[in-house]
Amino acid sequence: MRIQLALNVRDLDAAIDFYSKMFGVPVHKRMPGYANFVVDQPPLKLVLFHLPDAPERLNHLGVEVFDDEDVSAASERLKASGLEHLVEDETTCCYAKQNKVWAREPDGMRWEWYRVIEDSESFHATPETQPGAESV
């Protein structure tokens, strides 16, 4: 398990250069308008979205897990706590097919618990191929 920090950046190349040097690791995945880093210490998944006009630099926070049981456990915990959440199974996001659950904290920050199933060539699935999400 590792924390995910997803940032909106104005200059993707400059951000990649900075974070590669800061964490001492190469970019893990680079696609149009997107990059991510897998940092072992501290355990971190750093995601960069090229969104130069975004009003906020922080896009969202997440927890990357490595099996579906952890995604299900997070979903059940949210449900048992009465918190509104959104379950997405086999969704395509960020050039990867994923299972995930989303929630918003009281000030509106989005959190996701997710597992990457496999890489994808597209950033998002088209509406025709995207499985339905279940909001609970």
Image (cartoon, rainbow, N blue to C red):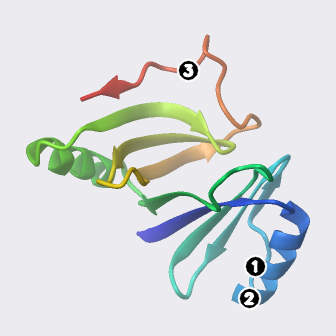
Q: Nearer the viewer, residue 67 or 107?
A: 107
Question: Amino acid under label 1?
Answer: Tyr
Identify whether 133 is placed above or below 80: above
Image quarter hosting the C terminus = top left
Q: Position of residue 37 (x, y in %)?
A: 69, 69
Q: Secondary structure at mark 3?
A: loop
Q: CA distance from mark 3 to mark 1?
A: 32 Å
- Residue occupying the point 54% across, 75% down: 44
* Residue pointed to by mark 1: 19
* Residue pointed to by mark 2: 22
Question: Amino acid under label 3?
Answer: Gln
How many numbered marks are there? 3
Contact (Cβ within 8 Å) of mark 3 with mark 1: no
Q: Secondary structure at mark 2?
A: helix
* Image-based side of 47 in relation to 3, left or right: right
Q: Position of residue 43 (x, y in %)?
A: 50, 80
Nearest to N terminus: mark 3 or mark 1 = 1
Q: Nearer the viewer, residue 114 or 6?
A: 6
Q: Position of residue 94 (x, y in %)?
A: 65, 45
User: For residue 2, which quarter of the picture?
Assistant: bottom left
Q: Residues within 10 Å of mark 1 (few under 14, many from 20)?
A: some
Image quarter hosting the N terminus = bottom left
